[in-house]
Image (tube, rainbow, N blue to C red):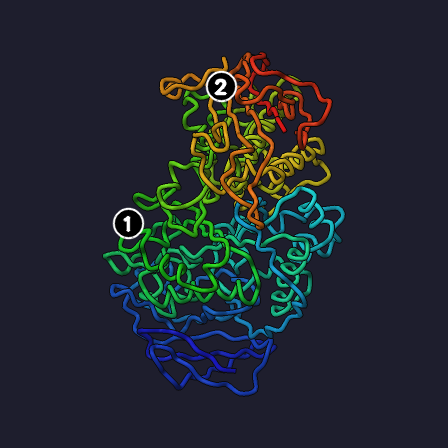
Amino acid sequence: MNFALFSEHADGVEVCVFDPGGGEQRIALPEHTDRVWHGYVPGLGPGARYGFRVPGPYRPREGQRFNPAKLLLDPYSRAIAGEVRWHDALCGYRAGEADELPDERDSAPFMPRSVVCDASFPWNDDRPPKTPWHETVIYEAHVKGFTQRHPEVPEALRGTYAGLAHPAAIEHLVRLGVTAIELMPVHYRVNTRRLAARGLSDYWGYNTIGFFAPDPRFASRGSEPDAVVREFKAMVRALHQAGLEVVLDVVYNHTAEGDEGGPTLCFRGVDNAAYYRLAQDRSRYTDFTGCGNSLNMQHPQTLRLIMDSLRYWISEMRVDGFRFDLAATLARELHQVDRLGAFFDIIHQDPVISQVKLIAEPWDLGSDGYQVGQFPVLWSEWNGRYRDTARDYWRGTNAGVGEFAARLTGSSDLYEAGGRRAYASVNFVTAHDGFTLRDLVSYNDKHNQANEEGNRDGSDDNRSWNCGSEGETDDPEILKLRARQRRNLLATLFLSQGVPMILSGDEIGRTQGGNNNAYCQDNEISWLDWAAADGEFLGFCQAMVAFYRGHPVLRRRQWFQGRAIRGVADIGWFRPDGSPMSDEDWDKGYAKALMVFLNGRAIPSRDRRGAAILDDSFLLLFNAHYEPLAFRLPNAEYGEEWTLLLDTATGAPIASAPAPGAPRLRSGMERVLEARSLIVLGRR
């Protein structure tokens, strides 16, 4: 085997090969080319366990923390065996003492091992679905949580990559109608010492250290490390065969080594000053993430590592895209977020990475870190303003309807000026970080006691409403209102321009008992409870997804113009009395009702054969008031007759299209909407 390790400031590098009994053989890499130490070790093959030791200066005040007593993971490990076993020897200096002197205890007994992998795999005729952005529906899920309690998945496969590839799991995704599954982090992660001491674990997986290695905790029982790679590939192949894309949530903004008091596991011992952003006091780290460190995006080797990782997951593991955690950190040049920075330049010119789906979580914890709408072309974003606006509207805050209308139509105020389309907005009401949809309408406050942090963790800005009682209740009126609110929020999501994202389990009524930060709950709090699935709401979700996918007027590739295209304007805005909205109406903070006309004959796009795209037209009527409200349909210019397709007050799934013979509403007629409800009217 050839071994190679970049280190700009090391005095040398030793590769450490371990036999099955744990014995260690150290071999100095003899060659040093362009700051890469390399050499050939005969007699090794797939399955070999190894690590590195890197001697060099230990001068924390200069940013150097080399310590050959510490076994290091290969930053390019394709597989990693074992878990970190917490011990003070993992620290580069003795805990509780000044960091002036290195800790000389050997960390190898407590470290996992890098593993040599056989990359071969029978992909056969695998073909990525390549779903266009404007046809994409995303399902955010956790590999383990999705199948851990699934009764139709064999027990040995539950919570694993193979479990996610099981026909029963795939059938649910296909019947729901989503086109892409966005997996929470699957890179090798380290359980923090703080959580391990409390008997908890980093369930979400955002504490990563191996950017090339799939996490072995999601492997089937008894799987060898290189078999984990094959199991992941088999999962991707199975999902592709079902027409589903695989998007990975990736964490390149920080690593599991934490701040200067954290363990020396990999990058800190390989070349601390190259891989990490150091503060003015170079013994400390610049932290934009709240996790103790930030990777040094100003160093070419760090950029290369990330790009190599992305290309590996695309080319070798065949994933279809990435969601970048705390992506604003990756875009920081000196201190400010720079949309013209090197990170974006490299991705945009890369012939592999630029061709897959790229999604930013467009914020971090640094100054000026909230960057929704500020990422460049090729990027879509988690639209946090959509989430906040949808929640505020349906819980009845006095925010007016102007902001709600902007989010409903794709957030052109955020994306149009930058040359992007509506699908730059990944719309969501709930995500892994926060309340589930059921909890959003059941709790005013977070209930994170199970995290053992005194309920101090998690956001206090939930924009939730419990509908009159905190938590579980048997009050039929409250339960009825909560069910309607769930339908309102989900229907709004699929009536909006942009890319909708569903949180796994929301479609079956999953609850976390009010926990809005279940990052450390690898148990029933986080796992989907299939036995308690809300079948009625699942049917509603399936119908809404099908309706969205079946109507191009909801998935426009061009922005609304608000002017006549093939006759009537492509969109119309009306007050409840049927008159057009005025400038003054948009600014009324107490207004909570709105009527929207979507013209299916005014879609300025053409199909693959060059023909004009035509669709049904719709009236969307929204009433977030706490009492019923009468709406008068607009004049016949917008449609003489309309058919009721959806009323969230009744709970019936949305009809796919206006049916012949269905009851009609004529222009100028009144229709009363129940309090906190919406209806959809259709016209062929």
Q: Which kind of residue does numbered mark 1 sit on?
A: Gln
Count of labels shown?
A: 2
Give the residue drawn at x 40%, y 50%: 377
**Residue annotated with mark 2:** 593
Q: Which kind of residue does numbered mark 2 sit on?
A: Ala
Query: Is residue 629 at least partly visible in the picture?
Result: yes
Which quadrant of the view contains residue 280? bottom left
Task: Tell whether 62 sits left or right of 25.
Answer: left
Q: Is residue 235 above or below residue 613?
A: below
Local SS, label 1: loop
Give the residue drawn at x 37%, y 50%: 376
Of all residues, the one furthest to the left in this rendering is 280
**Residue annotated with mark 1:** 336
| Location of residue 107 in the rendering, given as x and y in whole percent from the top left corner | 46, 69
| Location of residue 408 in the rendering, given as x and y in whole percent from the top left corner | 48, 32
Q: Is residue 587 above or below residue 451?
A: above
